[in-house]
Every structure is written in structure tokens, then in C-alpha cells.
Amino acid sequence: MTKLVPFFSNMLLIFFLTTALKAQHKPLDKEPIKWFSYISPGEISNIIEYADKLVLESISELSDDKRPKLDTVHIIKKVDNNFFIIEKKSRKGFGLMERTANTTSGYIEINAPLEAESITALEAKLKAGMPSWKSLESRRFYTEEKFNSLKKAPGLNEITREDLITSLTWREPLGTLLKAYVEDNKEKGKYKIYRFMEAYRNKKLIELGYNPYKMVAYNFEEMFNGDEEIIKLLTEEVTFD
């Protein structure tokens, strides 16, 4: 069986692209829409949505070369309002893209939870159902207005005790999903679990009005030295007993 290279094996890593590609644009039936996000401090990733493709744009604010790296994902088929079958010409097989929008909060969430060698096989996988933990791999992309507001938001060196506790309290919203991931991936280590928890924390911090990607110096253990509740949340081992 041909081994497939994941389209979006982890959405936190999607934009670490090694090759710049020029997109061949077909006639559009709608104006392109651009969405913005961070990969990490100083690393910005954007999506430009066309009717028949997504152009993925990666920009490093830390590099002297500010030219974006580009890649293109083609939309092959619309399954429904939230699911699309996608293809990258540089890779074999097809992927399933899930796209949901939160217009009130100014963002979309994108995930690519499934892949297969053919469209028929991919549709069969979708019909059979997806593991619940796949939602942990989704990433948020914001409107330009929301992203500009995020750039101006305070960094983590200004966080309050209450907000830090809120962002670190993951067990209720994530516990069931993380446990399902562990049960389906027993041969893998805990690295990805901590990435899921970090992604949740960062989403929550943005909701609370902070920019977790702002390049500022901070150390929570030093900032809240002696606060037993916070130190426990920062250092306790992840278990599901």
C-alpha cells in the first residue's frame, strides 16, 4: 500500500513549508477572503480562500526575508457546508478538510482529519465517522480586524492570576478528548498531548484578551511564586485516572 504523506498531520505545523509554489488561479465565482493566524511567536500563517482552492502563506517576522512562502491546496469536491475534499499536487491521495466559522468572534476553524488514496475511500471514511479527538487538531484563523486587535493585545507578562487559572484548567473541556486520543495512539508518547493542551490554552488566552504569541519575557512560576494552585496547574502530570 502506498504510504500517504499527511495533508495536515498537525495543524500547528501545516505552514512549515519548504518550497514556494505559484498558484495557478482559475476564474473565481467569489472574491478571495484572507484569514490570519500565528504558528509561534514571530511566525505568521495566513489562508487566502478562493472558490476552488486555498493559498497557504507563511511569513517570518524574525527573518530579514519577509517574502511569504506559498503553497496551494485545491478543493476537489464540496461534501456539504463544512466538509471539502482537497488535494495537493505535490502529494499522493486526497484529504478531507473541515471548515467551520464563528462570525460573532471573527474566526474560522480549519482541520484536515482524514486522508485516503481515492475520493471514494475518503467518503467512506467520513461516512463511517471520525474519532472525537480529531477536533483537537483544528486551528483558528482570524479576520484582519481581529488579528490586528490581537497584535495590540497584552502579552503573557501582564496576565492576571484569574485568567491564568482559566487558561490552564483543561481537564473538563479536554479530558475526554485527550483520553480518547491516548486510547487510539497507545504507541505514541505524550508530546502531542501537551501540544493539544498548549493550543487550547492559547485559544483561551486570545478569548480572554491576551496575545500568547507576543514576544515578551515571562515566567509563570516566578510571577506566581508561592501560589500553590497555579504551581500545581503548571507542573502536575497529565493523567486520566
Image: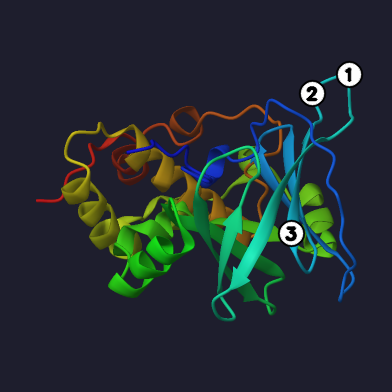
- Badge 2: how crowded within 10 Å, few (<14), some, or many (20+)? few
Q: Amino acid at mark 1?
A: Asp
The picture quadrant where one finds residue 33 is bottom right
Q: Which residue matches tag 2? A: 62
Give the residue type at disc 2: Leu
Residue 153 seen in render: yes
**Crowding near pointer 1: few (<14 within 10 Å), some, many (20+)?**
few
Looking at the image, is mark 2 or mark 3 nearer the viewer? Answer: 3
The three-letter code of the residue at mark 3 reads Lys
- Say which mark, if any, is on residue 132: none
7 vs 176, nearest the viewer: 7
SS of the residue at dot 3? Answer: strand
Residue 109 x/y as whole percent: 59, 63
Q: Quadrant of residue 149?
A: bottom right
The residue beneath circle 1 is 64
Whether residue 119 is situated above or below residue 62 in the rendered picture: below
Location of residue 57 with respect to 220 vertically, above or below: below
According to the picture, the residue beneath numbered tag 3 turns out to be 53
